[in-house]
Structure formats: C-alpha cells, structure tokens
Amino acid sequence: MQYRLTYLAETEVNWCPGLGTVLANDEIVNGVSERGGYPVIRKKMTQWSMRISAYAERLLQGLNEIDWSESIKNHNETGLENR
C-alpha cells in the first residue's frame, strides 16, 4: 500500500554554517544559534517533508492506542488539530 506520506521539496530552513546543521526556530536567539552563538541564515535546501495534514484523522485515532501520558497525547492532539 502506498500512502506517499513523505516527499522531497525545496524548503527554506534555518541554516547554521558554524554548526553545519539546520536549526529549529526555538534554537535561534536574536539571529544566532542558542548553542555556540553562531550566525544563522535562511537558505533553500532540499528536505524530506511529511503530509501530516493528509493523515491527521488517522494519527488522532491512533493516539488512543498509544501508551503515552495524557499530557503528551494532548500536546500531539493540539498540534494535529491546528494543521
């Protein structure tokens, strides 16, 4: 069965040449990396992406079957509902 959940796409990312990696928004403070204070630039890169919104309902249903704490389930549920 093919769901095509992932795909390659050109995406703008937070690139940190000093660390040699892409950073999440919460890892950047005033334009520099939280770790090391290196400059961060916006750059287009080919990245794997996921079609989470296409499967949000299935993912939400699956949360009931996972043995996770209610706080973690609620966090994931909120994220999926906001897509």
Image: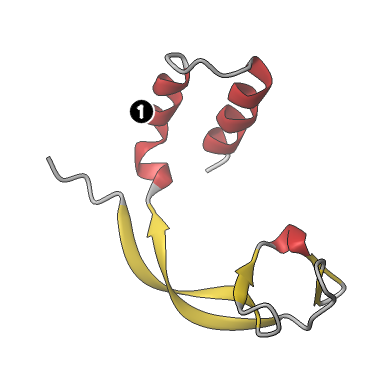
Q: Vertical placement of 82 versus 68: above or below?
A: below
The picture quadrant where one finds residue 76 is: top right
In the image, residue 26 lies at what x, y percent?
75, 58
Q: Vertical placement of 72 versus 46: above or below?
A: above
Q: Which residue is mark 1?
A: 58
Q: Is residue 47 left or right of residue 77?
A: left
In the image, residue 72 lies at what x, y percent?
63, 26
Residue at image point 82% right, 66% down: 34
Residue at image point 61% right, 79% down: 20
Residue situated in front as seen by the camera: 36 or 28: 36
In the image, residue 52 lies at what x, y percent?
42, 45
At label 1, counting other C-alpha atoms closer than 10 Å, the crowd grade (few under 14, some 14-19, many 20 or more) is: few
The picture quadrant where one finds residue 33 is: bottom right
Q: Vertical placement of 63 versus 42: above or below?
A: above
Q: Quadrant of the N terminus?
A: top left
Q: How many marks?
A: 1
In the image, residue 6 lies at what x, y percent?
32, 55
Residue at image point 39% right, 64% down: 48
Residue type highlighted by circle 1: Arg
Residue at image point 58% right, 73% down: 13
Q: Vertical placement of 83 versus 26: above or below?
A: above
Dot 1 falls on a residue whose secondary structure is helix
Q: How is the image coloured?
A: secondary structure
